Every structure is written in structure tokens, then in C-alpha cells.
Image: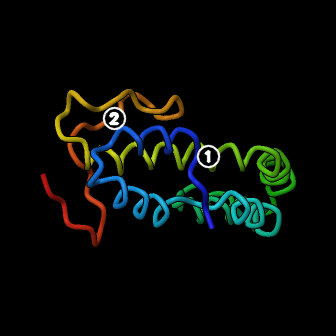
């Protein structure tokens, strides 16, 4: 399945020992597989299939509508070609950001929280523990 990115490994080591196994489990649960993302891009990328995989449904709907309305040759085909070459880096950036938000749940104090990954916008950094469905939040 997925292996951890170097950033996620570095964050996992900084967590308290009792939280490292839970962090690794949640990372594997929520991380996206770069190989599967590449397959989605090659096979369904012309209609935004990889956008749906990453949860960017608005972008996926816009790409699908653009393709099916005839604008596809002008808009979606060039985007599809570019994304075939960049999707694996985008997947790693997504996984790094997700690892940061999952790890924020397990640091003991907000002062222990390191800087977010470079791909994460600084306005989106939250020091409160973000809710993840189905997982209890403890302090």
C-alpha cells in the first residue's frame, strides 16, 4: 500500500511514543496512493477522475462539464497532459499536508507543533485538533 513520505516519517518520530502507532495507522488510512492517482489520471483524467480521488469534487465537476460541453479539447486535454506528469508530486504534497493535520491531534501542547509542510498554505494551519470522522478526539 502506501509508504510514508519523508516529511510524515519525520513528524511521526517527533510524536510521543504512545501516539506513534495511532499516527501511522491514521496516516495509512487517509493517505492517497500515488500509483493509484497516476492510474486515475491516465484513465479518467480527461474528465477529472483524479480530482474526485483527492476529494476536490468541485474541480472534478467543472472538468467533467467542460469536457462534455465541447470545451474539452481546449481546456481539459492540456490540463490532463500536464497532470499526468505532476500528479505524483501533488499526491505527495497532499499526503504531507494530511500527515501534518493528523499529527496535530497527538502533540501534547501547541508549542510542540512544528511548522507545516511547504505545500500547505499558512492561512489553513490550525492548531486545534481537526475533526476526522469516526476517530475519537482526546486531549
Q: Label 2, on which residue?
A: 125
Q: Which residue is nearer to you in this view: 50 or 70?
A: 50
* Quarter of the view holding residue 42: bottom right
Q: CA distance from mark 2 to mark 1?
A: 18 Å
Q: Secondary structure at mark 1?
A: helix
Picture quarter with the N terminus: bottom right
Instruction: Check contact, mark 2 vs mark 1: CB within 8 A.
Output: no
Instruction: Assign a secondary structure to mark 2.
Output: loop
Q: Residues within 10 Å of mark 1 (few under 14, many from 20)?
A: many
User: 10 Å neighbourhood of mark 2: few (<14), some, or many (≥20)?
Assistant: some
- The x, y position of residue 126, in whole percent, is 28, 38
Left or right relative to 9: residue 133? left
Give the residue drawn at x 77%, y 66%: 39
Q: What's the residue at 81%, 57% (across, down)?
A: 72
Residue 50, image x, y percentages: 67, 61
Q: From the viewer's perspective, is residue 138 above or below residue 14?
A: below
**Colour scheme:** rainbow
Where residue 124 sits, quadrant-wise, is top left
Q: Which mark is residue 92?
A: 1
Amino acid at each position: 500500500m502506501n509508504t510514508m513520505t519523508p516529511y510524515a516519517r519525520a513528524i511521526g518520530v517527533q510524536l510521543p511514543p504512545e501516539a506513534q502507532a495511532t499516527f501511522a495507522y491514521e496516516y495509512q488510512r487517509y493517505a492517497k496512493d500515488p500509483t493509484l492517482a497516476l492510474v486515475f489520471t491516465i484513465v479518467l483524467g480527461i474528465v477529472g477522475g483524479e480530482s474526485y480521488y483527492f476529494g476536490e469534487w468541485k474541480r472534478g465537476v467543472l472538468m467533467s462539464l467542460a469536457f462534455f460541453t465541447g470545451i474539452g479539447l481546449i481546456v481539459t486535454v492540456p490540463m490532463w497532459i500536464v497532470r499526468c506528469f505532476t500528479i505524483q508530486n501533488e499526491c505527495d504534497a497532499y499526503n504531507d499536508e494530511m500527515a501534518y493535520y493528523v499529527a496535530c491531534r497527538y502533540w501534547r501542547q501547541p508549542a510542540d507543533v512544528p511548522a507545516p509542510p511547504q505545500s500547505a498554505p499558512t492561512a489553513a494551519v490550525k492548531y486545534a485538533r481537526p475533526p476526522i470522522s469516526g476517530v475519537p478526539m482526546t486531549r
